[in-house]
Image (tube, helix red, strand yellow):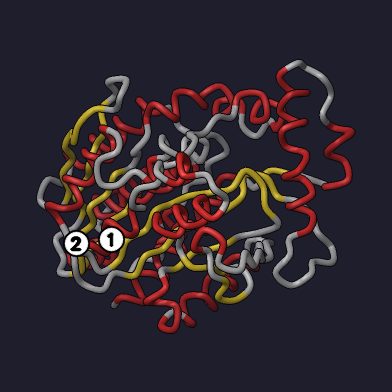
Amino acid sequence: MISLPDLAPDAEAFSPRADARTAIREACAAHEDVASVEVLGESEQGRPIDGVVLGTGATPVSLLAGNHADEPVGPQTLQALITSVLRRRADGDADAEAWLRRYRFAIVPHTNPDGEARNRAWIDAWPDLSAYLRHGAREAPGRDLEFGFPEMRPENRAVSGFLRSHGPFDLHASLHGMAAGEGAALLINRPWTFRTQPLRDGFVEAARAEGLRMHDHNRKGEKGFFWIEPGFQTTPRGDAMRTFFRARGDEATAARFHQSSMEFVMSLGGDPLCLVSELPLFLVENEDPEPGVPSAYLALKEQFSTLRKRAVHDDPVRPLLEPFNIRPLPLDRAIRLQLRALELGLQAVS
């Protein structure tokens, strides 16, 4: 079988959305017996949302990316997955052919084109941290697509209809990221925690090979994040989010949380493994981390609002950043790790 990390391009910059859509559509059109693409609907601002069916196998898998507006690595990863495996098939790669006949993917390469458009200024300037601080934007609760299933926004309705028509699934992955972190992290739905030790070991090894430690943050169940082992927590749930904000007396915010994509896919039936990848755009150095406490990340997080304000006003931010030794995670490394997480997930459900 093919190695998914080998499909990662030597990418240093993010593809423009129009180019990504064209590349996916052209790749699928050249392989109509194993790939198809359709417009599922439109975003709130009228941008098309595409759904791709890839492969003809008996193992059904759903893949989403882009639910959070300021996390562009996931869409880039799914573009690479689709176009690269079909390119290998075109080159006569028997492993790619076998892989496509083993799995059947329902993929939404980008659920949130409006969010990408709002973030395009810093995405085009990547890896300029000042540009990210100046132009980075994401949706608040009630607008957050990840917690808007099945029908909070038009984008959720389009994606839910597509998933419903192709489910139930054996594996679901929603590709995400973090603005900053001390390393890589992966979230796993609770019913699968005791069945995924080989997956977790493999992901730790892959992160180490890319020069990353694990981002270890024990949130002690807050918002549904239960610690499994260093770098691994359970996937969050809408009901846990509602409970968290109600406990703080914030009923208005609690009411804005619907199902996550993971909860929605689980509601379609079966026993799907659900994964959420969490890779930082920018790495924060922590030479002596305390178990479960990413102290350097937490200290930087406290500074973020100040950093954003200074960046917007073109005030220097480097003096505030110097204690953190912050640096970008190269795009190709991030894509390889996302693909490795998917590969390990496929192995787990097989």
- Residue at 66%, 62% (x, y): give it: 215
Q: Residue 310 versus residue 342: which sits nearer the camera? A: 310
- Residue at 67%, 52% (x, y): give it: 181
Q: Amino acid at mark 2?
A: Leu
Q: Which of the labelled discs sits on residue 337, or is there none?
A: none
- Residue at 27%, 56% (x, y): give it: 264
- Residue that mark 2 sits on: 268
- Residue that mark 1 sits on: 93
Q: Quadrant of residue 308?
A: top right
Which residue in the rendered view is the most extreme toward the top? 313
Q: Amino acid at mark 1?
A: Asp
Which secondary structure, mark 1? loop
**Residue 190 in picture, x, y percent from top left:** 42, 73
Seen in the picture, residue 311 relative to 50 is either above or below; the reply is: above
**Residue 234 in picture, x, y percent from top left:** 48, 68
Q: Residue 95 versus residue 292: which sits nearer the camera? A: 292
Q: CA distance from mark 1 to mark 2?
A: 34 Å
